[in-house]
Image (tube, grey):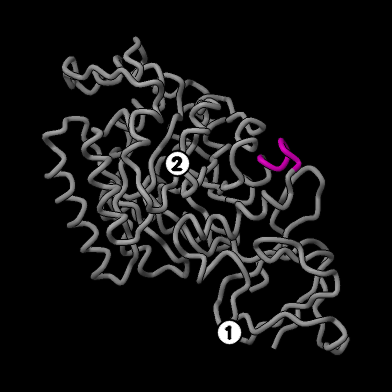
């Protein structure tokens, strides 16, 4: 048995009594929490800093790990998207898989125990099968043409069946409202709700997205020209990017990712089963801006964090993302909750991760007790 204490212990939802001790067995399974008076001094492992459950990365693109340092920073979303499209297949499949393996190892070393990961194809499935991390794979679909919805769902379900045969968890995910028809988004949301699975969608990562979906001239006109796609038939007249699809989401769990340019009206328009996933490093990498956190927190506490991909981040260290949020908001408990319990709940995994759960290996990390930043000191178990 191991008996762990620290300057402070956060259980995923709140800080515990200062005299609390966490008991783990030799396999890393959580046994119970006890008072320090019940533990012999010789048994106690006391640590300087804050103990937390294992971290949850709610939004990642492991299959883009080979794109580290490929795309220039802070050049805007249009340039970033064009680079993704033109360069994502610039290396061999073997190099992609090896980069994904290294990304997975890096996340393990940095205290991440569960990941919501975007996959467009199946090249990372075997990496996930071999990993100690629990992956929930979002099979991401694109299709602005409504007539393509059925074929895209068919393709997505075929990948879900591959995941199932490997013993891996997964659900469908629309890419974004500027790349998916309302019909496709609704079909995906209905499929996931029917199967009690979470839905994830990129939301308002760029102001150009809002312009495009209001029917205004935007950079997306140039993007579709670059892709040689005629979308002259598409005549959107929504209030914003979020307004384009929010009514199609339903009672299932929904994760909105990025939210960099969400207005207060947008924030007020959603229902209670929405989690707002923040990826601050990627926002700074691409657009050199961050969401309005003060405005966000006026309307919701249901936040979680993602690293996005190595195409838009220097590493996959999720505690860094929570640290940026903490440095801007001074909301320590919410930052830690987004890093642990909220992330697990957003993925439908709160019975396995995000807090200290008896009989479960939920991970245990030690982080700095810093008033301006959050940094991992070590993985304890």
The disc at residue 256 is 2
Q: Is residue 210 left or right of residue 260?
A: left
Q: Is residue 165 left or right of residue 365?
A: left
The residue lying at 70 percent from left, 82 percent from top is 23
Task: Kindly report the distance in space between the C-alpha atoms of the residues bearing marks 2 and 1.
Answer: 35 Å
Residue 166 horizontal/vertical position (percent) = 27, 70
The residue lying at 64 percent from left, 38 percent from top is 297
Instruction: Tell which of 92 and 252 is nearer to you.
Output: 252
Q: Are marks 2 and 1 in contact (CB under 8 Å)?
A: no
Residue 308 horizontal/vertical position (percent) = 47, 43
Residue 38 horizontal/vertical position (percent) = 83, 88
Residue 375 horizontal/vertical position (percent) = 71, 52
Residue at the disc numbered 1: 27
Evaluate whether residue 276 shows in this view: yes
The disc at residue 366 is none
Instruction: Tell which of 250 and 103 is nearer to you.
Output: 250
The residue lying at 34 percent from left, 61 percent from top is 196
The residue lying at 68 percent from left, 64 percent from top is 52
Q: Is residue 329 magenta?
A: yes
**Which SS class for mark 1?**
loop
Instruction: Tell which of 194 and 367 is nearer to you.
Output: 194
Q: Is residue 348 above or below residue 139?
A: below
Q: Is residue 302 left or right of residue 1?
A: left
Q: Is residue 150 above or below residue 343?
A: above
Q: How many marks?
A: 2
Task: State the quadrant of the C terminus.
Answer: bottom right
Task: State the quadrant of the N terminus.
Answer: bottom right
Q: Is residue 342 above or below residue 72?
A: below
The span picked out in magenta is 325-330
At label 1, counting other C-alpha atoms closer than 10 Å, the crowd grade (few under 14, some 14-19, many 20 or more) is: few
């Amino acid at each position: 048995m191991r008996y762990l204490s620290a300057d402070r212990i956060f259980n995923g939802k709140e800080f515990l009594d200062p005299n609390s001790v966490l008991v783990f067995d030799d396999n890393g399974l959580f046994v119970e929490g006890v008072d320090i008076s019940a533990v012999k001094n010789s048994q106690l492992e006391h640590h300087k800093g804050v103990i937390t459950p294992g971290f949850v990365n709610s939004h990642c693109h492991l299959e883009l790990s080979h794109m580290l340092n490929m795309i220039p920073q802070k050049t805007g979303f249009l340039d970033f998207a064009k680079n993704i499209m033109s360069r994502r297949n610039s290396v061999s499949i073997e190099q992609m898989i090896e980069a994904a393996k290294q990304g997975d190892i890096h996340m393990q070393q940095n205290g991440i125990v569960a990941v919501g990961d975007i996959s467009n194809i199946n090249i990372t499935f075997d990496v996930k099968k071999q990993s100690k991390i629990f992956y929930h794979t979002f099979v991401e679909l694109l299709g602005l043409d409504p007539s393509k919805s059925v074929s895209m769902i068919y393709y997505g379900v075929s990948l879900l069946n591959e995941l199932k045969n490997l013993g891996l968890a997964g659900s469908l995910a629309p890419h974004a409202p500027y790349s998916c028809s309302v019909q496709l988004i609704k079909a995906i949301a209905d499929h996931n709700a029917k199967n009690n699975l979470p839905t994830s969608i990129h939301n308002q990562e760029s102001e150009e997205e809002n312009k495009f979906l209001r029917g205004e001239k935007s950079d997306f006109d140039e993007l579709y020209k670059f892709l040689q796609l005629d979308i002259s038939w598409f005549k959107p007249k929504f209030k914003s990017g979020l307004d384009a699809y929010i009514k199609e989401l339903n009672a299932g769990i929904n994760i909105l990712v990025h939210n960099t340019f969400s207005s207060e009206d947008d924030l007020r328009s959603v229902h209670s089963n929405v989690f707002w996933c923040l990826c601050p490093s990627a926002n700074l990498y691409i657009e050199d801006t961050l969401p309005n956190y003060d405005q966000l927190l006026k309307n919701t506490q249901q936040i979680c964090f993602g690293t996005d991909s190595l195409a838009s981040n220097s590493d996959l260290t999720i505690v860094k993302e929570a640290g940026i949020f903490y440095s801007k908001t001074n909301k320590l408990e919410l930052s830690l909750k987004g890093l642990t319990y909220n992330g697990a709940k957003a993925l439908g995994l709160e019975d396995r991760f995000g807090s200290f759960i008896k009989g479960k290996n939920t991970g245990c990390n030690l982080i700095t007790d810093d008033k301006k930043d959050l940094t991992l000191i070590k993985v304890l178990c």
